[in-house]
C-alpha cells in the first residue's frame, strides 16, 4: 500500500453546468482549465508540480508542497478572478464562468486509480456545502 503524502488540495466547480448544452460545456471547461493553469503558473507552479483530475463540470488538483502557499493563495484571490472577469466580459452569456473554489491541504494516498483520503473528502464536502453555494448565489 502506498504511504500518504501531503498535498495542497484545490477544487474548482463550474456553476450551472447542468443547464448548459454540450457546446457551452466545452467552452466553459476550456476556460476553466486555461484560468486554473494560468493561476498556478503565476504562483510559480510548473505543470510537473501538480496532478489534475477532471470532474466534467470541474477539476481537482493536488499540488506539491514545494509550491509556495502564499503565492498560490495570491493567485487564487487575485490573478484567477481577474483573468476570469476579463474573459467573462467578452463571452456570450452561455460561455460565462462562475466558480466555486476550495483550497485545503492534507494527507492523500495516490494509487493507480487516483487519490483518496479523509482530507480530500473534507475538501469535497466544503465544495458541495450549502454555505459555499449560498455565497455564490448571493
Image (tube, helix red, strand yellow):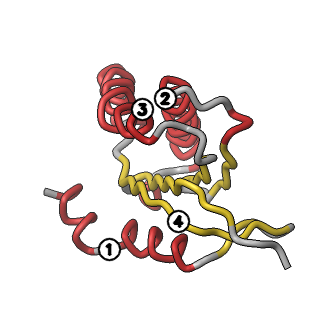
How far, Cα to Cα, is label 1 from label 2? 27 Å
Are the residues flagged by discs 3 and 2 in contact, CB closer than 8 Å?
Answer: yes
Q: Which circle's residue, 4 or 1, is located before the other in the chain?
A: 4
Quadrant of the image occupied by residue 66: top right
Q: Which badge, 4 or 3, is on the more N-terminal residue?
A: 3
Q: Quadrant of residue 93?
A: top left
Front residue of 64 and 11? 64
Residue sitting nearer the eye, 3 or 20? 3
Compute the Cα span from label 4 to label 1: 19 Å
Relative to residue 82, is residue 62 drawn left or right?
right
Question: Which numbered dot is residue 129?
Answer: 1
The answer to whether 58 appears left or right of 128 in the picture is: right
Q: Earlier in the sequence, mark 3 or mark 2?
A: 2
SS at circle 2: loop
In the depicted structure, whether residue 127 falls above or below residue 61: below
Q: From this viewpoint, which residue is outermost toward the left?
A: 138
Q: Residue at x 37, y 48 (%)?
A: 99
CA neighbours of label 2 inside 10 A, class few (<14), some (14 to 19), many (20+): many
Identified at 43% across, 36% down, the residue is 95
**Residue hosting label 4:** 106
Task: Check if mark 1's residue and mark 2's residue have beta carbons within 8 Å.
Answer: no
Quadrant including the C terminus: bottom left
Q: Secondary structure at mark 4?
A: strand
Q: Nearer the viewer, mark 4 or mark 1?
A: 4
SS for tag 3?
A: helix
Image coordinates of residue 15 in percent, x first then y, are 37, 54
Q: Which residue is mark 2?
A: 43
Q: Is residue 50 shown left or right of residue 18? A: right
Asked which quadrant contains residue 87, the reply is top left
Residue 62 pos. (x, y %): 61, 53
Q: Nearer the viewer, mark 1 or mark 3?
A: 3
Q: Residues within 10 Å of mark 3 (few under 14, many from 20)?
A: some
Amino acid at each position: 500500500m502506498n504511504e500518504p503524502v501531503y498535498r495542497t488540495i484545490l477544487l474548482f466547480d463550474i456553476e450551472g453546468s447542468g443547464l448548459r448544452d454540450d457546446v457551452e460545456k466545452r467552452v466553459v471547461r476550456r476556460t476553466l482549465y486555461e484560468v486554473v493553469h494560468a493561476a498556478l503558473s503565476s504562483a510559480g507552479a510548473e505543470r510537473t508540480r501538480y496532478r489534475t483530475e477532471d470532474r466534467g463540470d470541474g477539476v481537482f488538483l493536488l499540488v506539491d508542497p514545494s509550491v509556495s502557499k502564499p503565492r498560490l493563495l495570491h493567485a487564487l484571490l487575485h490573478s484567477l478572478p481577474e483573468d476570469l472577469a476579463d474573459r467573462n466580459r467578452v463571452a456570450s452569456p452561455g460561455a460565462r464562468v462562475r466558480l466555486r473554489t476550495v483550497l485545503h491541504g492534507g494527507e492523500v494516498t495516490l494509487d493507480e486509480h487516483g487519490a483518496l483520503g479523509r482530507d480530500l473528502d473534507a475538501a469535497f464536502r466544503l465544495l458541495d456545502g450549502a454555505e459555499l453555494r449560498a455565497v455564490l448565489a448571493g
